[in-house]
Amino acid sequence: MSLLMTVRIAFKALGRNKLRTALTMLGMIIGVAAVIAMVALGSGAQATIEEQVKSAGTNLITISPGSTNTQGVRTGFGNSTKMVPEDAAALRDLPEIQYVAESVNTRTQLIYGNQNWNTQIEGTNVDLPAIRSWPQKYGSFFSSEDVKSAAKVCVLGSNVSDNLFGEDVDPTDQVIRVRNHVFRVLGVMASKGAGSGGTNLDDQVFAPYTTVMKKLSGQLNLNRIYVSARSADDIDSAAQAITQALRARHEITAGDPDDFTVQTLDDIVALRTQTTNTMTQLLAGVAFVSLVVGGIGIMNIMLVSVTERTREIGLRMAIGARGSDVLLQFLIEAVVISSVGGAIGIALGYGVSEAVKYYQNWPALVPITAVFTAVAFSAAVGIFFGFYPARKAAGLDPIEALRFE
């Protein structure tokens, strides 16, 4: 008997019991739909976490003055005045480093016309937008010449711009008063939202660090140095090179603790990895349970079908059908049930994920690999759980089958 004829007979057999076939598919549909929906929501959550990590900076390393333990005194980060602009200049010569940005912070009141706003001013240099992967909304960032000359220019965060000038207003080339100084606005940074610590990244102003040090804060030391490694693989080696360079500059002898702290995004990456692993294990468990339940349903119905069609099987074998033909027919029926159920489950899973995305504002992303995996699993389940009923049907004695009532 040809394969095409066997397939046609299998489909006709399924068509004679449409309701039973549909109910058999239902377990597979629900299981696959649940897996697809959870993969979509889990992948969306992972993409959100990755975006948050990316928003913190590109291969970011943060260097803070002070140490958790200096000469037996627990000072904490930022409580040392030994970090100076020359330290940042020295780090630019390291081959593992791509960008370096000084950071000096102060807080003050900004005034424009009859509007005012209290915010943080961060003194930095031209590399900060590249380190933070932060584009401009309006205008441009200040230049290296502005940093060298300590020019009174600034770039506003979007929240500051909205409060001083109004929403969707380009304040480029406007002037604002910062204490007793007049600053020219060069542009506005694109909205970035909350940072990893929950602070509003849009509620700050950027100015040349030389300007902030000389005209606003009066300090000679840096609050932080932000560094970007050349690649993610270079972060560890860059952190080690930074530590060695600063220890040499600060004349720290062997055995003495650092008077600075080098921090990477390891904590955030570890959290992302933990979240991803937990989600993967959860999805694997759900997929296993759903497929086993759906497969048991297929096996159960196929066994019932073999019993009901005993005389039909005996008649087919009596007129020349081989055991392999019967085996193939029942295997095809099981694979069709599981595959069609899997396909409908994929469509339903897409629909559920899109509904959750629309109504609950939850990110959803269905990897194409998850779709192919679901289809392959569906077919594999059909073959695995359909083999025993098919083998039982193929092993029937034609004479005994014809006598079956």
Image (tube, rainbow, N blue to C red):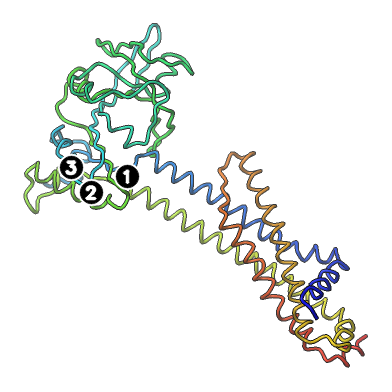
Residue assigned mark 3: 260
Of 397 and 218, the residue lying toward us: 397
Cα gap from disc 3 to disc 1, whole angstroms? 19 Å
Residue assigned mark 2: 238
Residue drawn at x 16%, y 30% is: 221
Q: Position of residue 93 (x, y in %)?
A: 16, 41
Residue drawn at x 22%, y 17% is: 151
Cα gap from disc 2 to disc 3, whole angstroms? 15 Å
Residue type at mark 2 is Ala
Residue assigned mark 1: 59
Residue drawn at x 87%, y 78% is: 308
The quarter of the displayed image where residue 134 is located: top left
- Mark toward the start of the polypeptide (2 vs 3): 2
Q: Residues within 10 Å of mark 3 (few under 14, many from 20)?
A: many
Residue type at mark 3 is Phe
Residue type at mark 1 is Asn
- Mark toward the start of the polypeptide (2 vs 1): 1
Q: Position of residue 132 (x, y in %)?
A: 34, 36
Q: Quadrant of the N terminus?
A: bottom right
Q: Which label lies toward us, 2 or 3? A: 2
Q: Which label lies toward us, 3 or 1? A: 1
Instruction: Please report contact status of discs 2 and 1: CB closer than 8 Å, yes or no.
Output: yes
